[in-house]
Image (tube, rainbow, N blue to C red):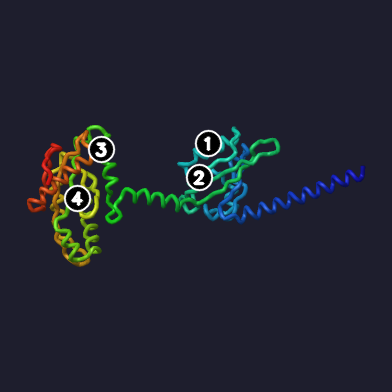
Amino acid sequence: MYAAHAGIAIYRAQLMDQLIENEQAFRLEFENAGIGMAVLSLKANESSRYLRANTAFCHLVGYTEKELKTMSTADLTHPDDRDTDLVNIEKAVTTDQRVFEVEKRYQHADGGSVWVCVTTSVIEDANGHPVSAISQVQDIGQRRALLKTLARDALHDSLTGLANRRALYQHLHQIQASGEGGAQTCVLFCDLDGFKSVNDRFGHYFGDRALTAVAHRLGGAVGDEGVVARLGGDEFVVVAPLAKIEAFARRLTETVAEPFIVNGTSVALTVSIGIAALGALTEPAQAIHRADWAMYEVKRLGGNGYIIAPDSKDSEQP
């Protein structure tokens, strides 16, 4: 009997040593992890309060571990993202789902916000009841910023910052899908007169600066009343209301005709503009094609002006 009790005591001592060793290993891994980690309570009376937080997590949110222990995940989460947190916590307590992943924002101690990806695993007690959760937190701010930049670049001209061809066609299709908008909208195909000679004389860098200046002027002239896009080279398209189309065209020709100062050099440019109604049923490409045809008619007549294309698709091509 004595030997049996002694064996049990030794086993318990070994088990305790193993538990202590495991706890120490966990502490080391937790504290030295390269990503943020935090443990929060799932007990009903503790409202998802933080129990522990490693150095990486504290650095990410700008709070000390002592400060975090007085806060809940709702206190730290951006107000617009709290509902998602509440849903996940409710699932953890009331369902068998034990792992959650969500992208959300934390409110940093400095008042800013931090985009993170949080993977949370639920910890159960001996009876299988959720008592706490451990979260692994990755800063995804740079990734989101990169994706935002890529999305913007996909729809904008890299030189001028204007909408590009893809964005232009998306915009025209959206106008048509809105109902009668297409019937009340025109496209103005703008091509600079004499730009090639400027580019040949002063070089491509100078030409790019001139194009950027033209884009800025066109954008300023159109303002909130329309959209300006660059198709490429010295070709631009303006989307504007049909009711004001001739006023728009005059404004654009006058704006471009004012001398440009590029790198201290005065440059004189003019613009030829072809105008075509978008139409409720016309394919945007057809409207732009008719406007392009009208623009070449202006070129043929000497440039620096505008012509409105006939509605017929059978207009004689230049």
Residue placed under numbered mark 1 in the picture = 87
**In the image shown, does 17 or 284 lie closer to the viewer?**
284
The span from disc 4 to disc 1 (Cα, nearest Å) is 49 Å
* Other-residue count near label 1 (Cα within 10 Å), few / some / many at <14 / 14–19 / ≥20: few
Residue placed under numbered mark 4 in the picture = 221
- Horizontally, is 136 left or right of 273 in the view? right
Residue for point 25% across, 40% down: 172
- Horizontally, is 163 left or right of 195 in the view? right
The span from disc 3 to disc 1 (Cα, nearest Å) is 38 Å
Q: Earlier in the sequence, mark 3 or mark 4?
A: 3
Secondary structure of the residue carrying numbered label 2:
loop
- Closer to us: mark 2 or mark 1? 1
**In the image shown, does 159 or 284 lie closer to the viewer?**
284
Residue for point 57% across, 55% down: 34
Amino acid tagged 4: Ala
- Closer to us: mark 2 or mark 4? 4
The span from disc 2 to disc 4 (Cα, nearest Å) is 43 Å
Q: Position of residue 204 (x, y in %)?
A: 24, 63
Residue placed under numbered mark 3 in the picture = 175
* Callout 3 touching callout 1 (CB < 8 Å): no
Amino acid tagged 3: Ile
Amino acid tagged 2: Thr
The span from disc 2 to disc 1 (Cα, nearest Å) is 13 Å
Amino acid tagged 1: Val
- Closer to us: mark 3 or mark 4? 3
Residue placed under numbered mark 2 in the picture = 77
Secondary structure of the residue carrying numbered label 3:
helix
